[in-house]
Amino acid sequence: MEGIIKYQAIWTDKSPISKSEFEKINFFRSLAVKRSYMGIGADGIGYGNISYRLDSNNQFIISSSATGGISIADRGDYSKVIDFDISNNEIYCKGNKIASSESLTHAAIYQSNPEIKAVLHIHNEELWQKHLFQLPTTSEDIEYGSVAMAEAIAELIKTYSDNKGAFVMGGHREGIIAFGESLQDCIEILEGL
Ligand SMILES: [Zn+2]
């Protein structure tokens, strides 16, 4: 069963991301927190994750695991994904902390379309209800964080004629993903929902 394969982070190096990498992402993370696209849920667990592509080799900077609830992030709250293997659910990362457990989803999007440079995954009950099956929606039967989900998202991304957009995660309540050519695109797309 693909659905039960657990995400594996292969943590290669604990040095933090660079100052310039931090500055490129943190402004938009702060905006996302301000809009409650990222934050702490009623269950006390942090939610949401954000990333941007570094280069054409599908490497990206992403918020680290379990940092969604941190209001002001520092360099240590981000990780660099240097490689991944979707079929084995493996992420190779660097940073003070391991990469977000939802990194495979971001990886699948970057791999699917080289023009996509940024991804923002949010939780929002109201937007999720409003757009479920109105926007493209992944199957309710696919468990989040699974290889099957990453593969479904890769297929879904190929159906967009544009390099920016949003979709609903049918099997991940409150989960919405925006992607675009920049983090600014992601914020604007979400604001327009
Ligand atoms: Zn989520």
Image (cartoon, helix red, strand yellow):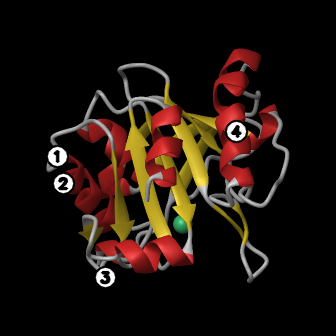
Alpha-carbon distance for marks 3 and 2? 16 Å
The residue to which callout 1 is attached is 158
- The disc at residue 155 is 2
Q: Residue at x 76, y 27 (%)?
A: 15
The quadrant of the picture occupied by the N terminus is bottom left
Report if the CB atoms under discs 2 and 4 are less than 8 Å apart: no
Q: Earlier in the sequence, mark 2 or mark 4?
A: 4
The alpha-carbon separation of the residues under discs 2 and 4 comes to: 27 Å
Residue that mark 3 sits on = 140
Tell me the distance, in whole angstroms, between the alpha carbons under discs 3 and 1: 20 Å
Q: 167 above or below 137? A: above
State the image coordinates of residue 115 (x, y, percent, origin top left). Answer: 29, 27
The C terminus sits in image quarter: bottom left
Separation of marks 4 and 3 at Cα, in angstroms: 30 Å
Q: Secondary structure at mark 1?
A: helix
Mark 1 belongs to which amino acid? Lys
The residue located at (25%, 35%) in the rendering is 113
* Residue at position x 22%, y 38% in the image: 162
